[in-house]
Amino acid sequence: MDQRVAYMRKALRLAERGRGRVSPNPLVGAVIVRDGQVVGTGAHLRLGGAHAEVNALAQAGELARGATLYVTLEPCCVHGRTPPCTDALIAAGIRRVECALVDPDPRVNGRGIELLREAGIQVDVGLESAAAERQNAGYLKHRRCGLPWVTLKLAQSADGRIATAAGDSRWISGELSRRWVHRARSRVDAVMVGAGTVLADDPQLTVRHVRGRDPRPLIVDGKLRVPLAARLLQRPGAVLITSAANPPAAYAAFQERGVEVWTFPAEDGLVDLRAVLRQAAAAGITHVLLEGGAHLAAQALVARVVDEVHLLIAPMLLGTGIGSIADLHIRRLCQALRLDEVHVRRLGPDLIYTAKVRYPCSPG
């Protein structure tokens, strides 16, 4: 393996240490190399804390002078929660920077690289860029499109059911799969469900089986069917998403309980999910985990706002029951939504099927 690639992959591994802790900031890892030896490493570990480059410089000390920095994202050049990393790199005497990606944040977007070059530092961009894109998919989409990354999670039987005909769904997936889901929740900013799921299961959607933060709950309820006592609505930061056609008096009791209410245009009670996600992005949400139910899943797929799916498939057959996804209005195979970049792994008796969604006639 090219040693440069090895150093950047080390930086990518370091960046993962900030997963679930730094959003809406990006995951960033940094490695400083001098004379073929790693002299400093760092990662962005908490929101408001020192950036990866600064942590790596602190570890390297005077050995940073004349060294090469491998970093997974363009160094920042603006005063935010911390001073600019470009200033620190220039002051430390870094000679060369290998950067995986340009930061699309409009406050940066190449300006950090430009400032380093103006200071006489050689900067090369693109090493392990595909891996860096995957790692920061939520941040990059948020900055480029003004939308969060959306992951649809479905736990279903082998014949595609999320519950029996009588509505019994606990538990389709096994214990290891449920632990995996809790870890996935700990790594996103928000979890979204529909009114049907709240009415059927009254879920908590917290992180319990692993250590990590709870995601912000978003409840989509165009017709205001969920009860005020629903457990999700007792959570700090809960958001009730409903139709703008509902009079304010209809949801005033929720607001009095501290629930934030977002209203949007709706057709037959179905809110505009793309508009919902734009507001979520404006609130600093970069990654949403959509956990159900079947109608919200279908609505999101029809609206083309789902980026990837996690299918947890249990080795059981339910026959007639509740399907995992409602009608997508697909009548011909050429209209089917295709899944790309498919990865399958086993967790106990279950299979976890992860893939990107590709929409018909869509770019890419």
Image: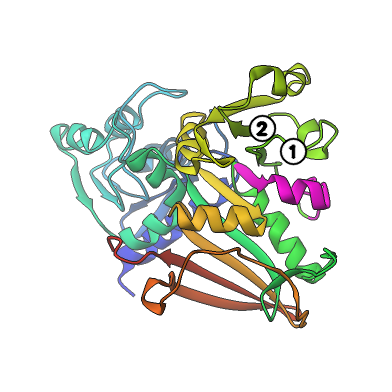
Residue at the (70%, 59%) spot, across then down: 181
Q: Position of residue 279 (x, y in %)?
A: 48, 32
Please give the residue where the numbered disc 1 appears in the rendered image: 225
Please give the residue where the numbered disc 2 appears in the rendered image: 240
User: Which amino acid, by three-letter code, is at mark 2?
Assistant: Leu
289 and 56: which is toward the camera: 289
318 and 132: which is toward the camera: 318
Question: Is 341 part of what is drawn in magenta?
Answer: no
User: Which badge, 1 or 2, comes first in the chain's sequence?
Assistant: 1
Give the CA separation, mark 1 to mark 2.
11 Å
Mark 1: give few (<14), some (14-19) or many (20+) Cα within 10 Å. Answer: few
Question: Taking 225 as reference, is 28 left or right?
Answer: left
Q: Quadrant of residue 241?
A: top right
Give the residues drawn in magenta, as a range.
Answer: 190-209
Model colouring: rainbow
Question: Taking 241 as reference, is 337 left or right?
Answer: left
Question: Taking 165 as reference, is 344 left or right?
Answer: left
Residue at the (43%, 55%) spot, across then down: 304
83 and 337: which is toward the camera: 337
Residue at the (54%, 38%) spot, across then down: 22
Using the image, determine if residue 229 lies above or below residue 295.
above
Q: Position of residue 84 (x, y in %)?
A: 35, 27
Query: What is the secondary structure assignment of the residue under circle 1?
Result: loop
